[in-house]
Structure formats: C-alpha cells, structure tokens
Amino acid sequence: MIVYNLLADTVNFCHFFGFTFVTSFPIIHYIDQYQPYRKRLSNYTYYGLSLISSGVLISYYLFDNLCLASALEHYLNPIKYTSYVVTNGTKFSILLSLICTLGPTFFRERKHKFYFVGTYYSYIFYSIIEIYVFKK
C-alpha cells in the first residue's frame, strides 16, 4: 500500500510538471531568438515538441476527455486522488500551445514569431485574470 501511495504521488508530481512543461513550449521560440545563429534549435525540435501536445489532445479525444494521468493516480490511490474529465478550456489551451509551438517554424522574421508567443501568453494571462478576478 505504501508503494502505491508513493507511486501515486510520483505520478501526480509528473502530471503537474508535465502540464507545466507542455504549456511552456511556445516561450522556447522567444528564448531561442536571442541565441547565436549557430546555436539555435532546428525546426525538427519544435516538431518533436508538438508531438507531445498532439498526443495529449489525441488521448483526450480517444478516451472521452478523460485525463489518463488522473485515472492512473486514482487507480493507485483512490482515496487521495480522483480521475477527472478535462474541460474545454484546458483542451483549448493545449491546442493553442500546439499552434504557437508549430506556427513560428513557418516564419523567418522575428516579429512574426513573437506574434505567436504574445498571443499564447495573452490568452494565459486573460484566463488567469478571468478565473481569479472575475470569478465566473
């Protein structure tokens, strides 16, 4: 039982870290622009990162919006964790993260790449303000 609790806590930590990691993909373009040209990441790196976001969205589609990580947490420790269904806002933020990770790979100019980063983080800040200030 202790092993299952430890595994459930580990999955929960990885779930939280993974979601934070996936939602921070678009900022990599911004950071990469200030690197010397030879040290910049190739477009294949962004294609690989977009596969992670795509996999998450496909799993939501295949399993009727069930978060698989939360289902595993619930299986390992049903008292502490519950499995939950993902909301449309979460799916939209991952989809926007996917678009803003892939989008800048098709543009060469720095300002076009920054439009994607600005759009994504404007949406994130708007969501935070909407949740905590306006409290729907």
Image: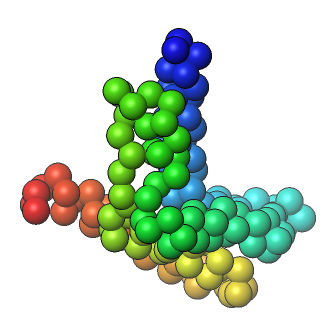
Q: Is residue 1 above or below residue 12?
A: above
Q: Name the side, left or right, on which 55 lies relative to 45.
A: left
Q: x%, y% of residue 21?
A: 57, 50
- Along the line of sight, the residue nearer the viewer: 124 or 74: 74
Q: Is residue 47 above or below residue 27?
A: below
Q: Is residue 70 above or below residue 97?
A: above
- Along the line of sight, the residue nearer the viewer: 62 or 37: 62
Q: How is colour applied across the structure in the image? A: rainbow
Q: x%, y% of residue 112?
A: 58, 84
Q: Residue at x 50, y 26 (%)?
A: 9
Q: x%, y% of residue 78?
A: 39, 31
Q: Residue at x 58, y 25 (%)?
A: 7
Q: x%, y% of residue 11?
A: 55, 35
Q: How many marks?
A: 0
Q: Quadrant of the C terminus?
A: bottom left
Q: Residue at x 51, y 30 (%)?
A: 76
- In the displayed orientation, state which residue is furthest to the right: 38
Q: Residue at x 19, y 63 (%)?
A: 130
Q: Name the side, left or right, on which 86 lies relative to 10.
A: left
Instruction: Confirm whether residue 114 shows in the render.
Output: no
Q: Is residue 106 above or below residue 96?
A: below
Residue 47 occupies which quadrant of the picture? bottom right
Instruction: Confirm whether residue 45 shows in the render.
Output: yes
